[in-house]
Image (cartoon, rainbow, N blue to C red):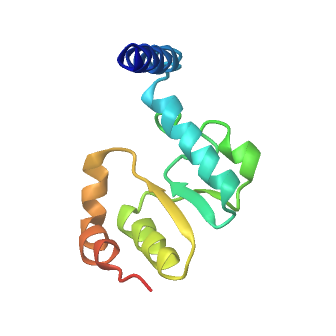
Amino acid sequence: MLGVIRHKSIRHAFSAIRHLSSAAKEITVREALNSALDEEMSADPKVFLMGEEVGEYQGAYKISKGLLEKFGPERVLDTPITEAGFAGIGVGAAYYGLGPVVEFMTFNFSMQAIDHIINSAAKKKKK
């Protein structure tokens, strides 16, 4: 009898898990990234976003859609086309305890800042 009860309760638990997993909302990668940025920026005032066209234009791929209106130009910063420059600013900001999110338009553009990414950002020591 005990084995039957355990078997039924296990079956019930699995059906509950299946029910929860099927209730997941499908979203695009763009929506997921936007939601994650929004969530982190809401949770921590030290987090900010910088990159080319992330503010007024709302991102080349609309990742930052609505963030300028919600958080203002102090936390959603449009930068000039100087990938190495704003990557370096992001690394420096992180060194001083801020939470920069640096967006490059494409992976190819990030290669302009590879020195900061590999030789500075990746080697920061934890305090």
Extreme residue toward the bottom, this view: 127
Measuring 50% from the left and 14% from the top, which residue is drawn there?
19
User: Is 116 rendered above or below residue 23?
Assistant: below
User: Is 66 rendered above or below residue 44?
Assistant: above
Q: Is residue 59 visible?
A: no
Quadrant where the N terminus sits is top left
Q: Nearer the viewer, residue 82 or 17?
A: 17
Quadrant where the C terminus sits is bottom left
| Position in image of residue 39 (x %, y %) | 63, 46
For residue 126, side relative to residue 98 (left or right): left
Extreme residue toward the front, this view: 1
The quarter of the picture where residue 97 lies is: bottom right
Q: Nearer the viewer, residue 45 or 86?
A: 45
Measuring 50% from the left and 34% from the top, which residue is drawn there?
32
For residue 56, side relative to residue 82 (left or right): right
Q: How many marks?
A: 0
Q: Is residue 40 visible?
A: yes
Measuring 52% from the left and 76% from the top, which residue is drawn there?
93
Measuring 60% from the left and 62% from the top, which residue is drawn there?
47
| Position in image of residue 66 (x %, y %) | 68, 37
| Position in image of residue 75 (x %, y %) | 66, 59
User: Is 90 rendered above or below residue 33?
Assistant: below
| Position in image of residue 10 (x %, y %) | 41, 20
